[in-house]
Amino acid sequence: MKHIAKSIRTFIGAKDFEESRAFYGDLGFQESVISDKMSYFRVNSDLGFYLQDYYVKDWVNNSMIFLEVADVDRYWESLQQLGLPLKYRRVKLTPIKEYDWGKECFLHDPSGILWHFGAFY
C-alpha cells in the first residue's frame, strides 16, 4: 500500500479538561477548539495532538508522547523557565538523561501523560 502521509496525530485524555487546555497553552501549543469536549493542539504547522475531555486512569497513566526537538538542552532551559510544576500541582519535570541514541528530558502533564522531549545523535 502506497500513500503519501501528511501527519500523524494521537488522541490523549484529560483528568481536568480546562486545566489541561491551560497547561498546553502555557507549554506553547496553539489550540483549535473542535467542540466543547475536544481541542486540537499544534506546534509548528503540522505537529499536534487531540485533547479530549475524557479520562480513563489506566489509559492516561500509560500514555507517552515523544516530541523530537532540535536542542534538548535549550528546550530543558525553556521548560524550567515556564514554572509549570509551580502552577500545576501534578506536573513533574525530570532532567535530561543521555543514552547511546541521544538524550531527552521528561514532563508529566496535569493528567499524568508522560512527554519525552528528545534529540537523536
Image (cartoon, rainbow, N blue to C red):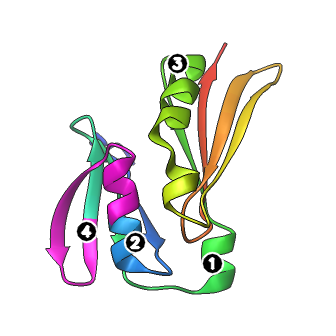
> Is 110 situated above or below 74?
below
**Magenta run includes residue 37:** yes
| Residue 52 shows in the view | no
Distance in Å between CA atoms under marks 4 and 2: 13 Å
Tag in front: 4 or 2: 2
Q: Residue furthest front?
A: 86
Alpha carbon separation for disc pair 4 and 1: 19 Å
Q: CA distance from mark 1 to mark 3?
A: 31 Å
Q: Which residue is mark 1?
A: 59
Task: Say whether disc 4 or disc 3 marks the residue closer to the N-terminus.
Answer: 4
Which residue is at 31% across, 47% downward? 29
Numbered disc 3: secondary structure: helix
Cα distance in 3D space between marks 4 and 3: 28 Å
Q: Residues within 10 Å of mark 1 (few under 14, many from 20)?
A: few
**SS class, disc 2:** helix
Q: Which residues are magenta?
A: 22-39
Q: Residues within 10 Å of mark 2 (few under 14, many from 20)?
A: some
Q: Amino acid at mark 3?
A: Arg
Which amino acid type corresponds to the residue marked 2 in the rendered image?
Glu
Mark 1 or mark 3: whose residue is earlier in sequence:
1
Percent x, y for residue 41? Answer: 29, 55
Classify 67 as above or below 40.
above
Left or right: 112, with 15 as reference point: right
- x, y percentage for residue 108? 62, 56
Label drawn at residue 19? 2
The residue beneath circle 4 is: 39
* Above or below: residue 16 compared with residue 31: below
Judging depth in this view, the residue of 91 and 104 nearest the camera is 91
Answer yes or no: do the residues labelled 2 and 1 have beta carbons within 8 Å?
no
Residue at mark 2 to residue at mark 1: CA–CA distance? 18 Å
Q: Is residue 58 left or right of residue 86?
A: right
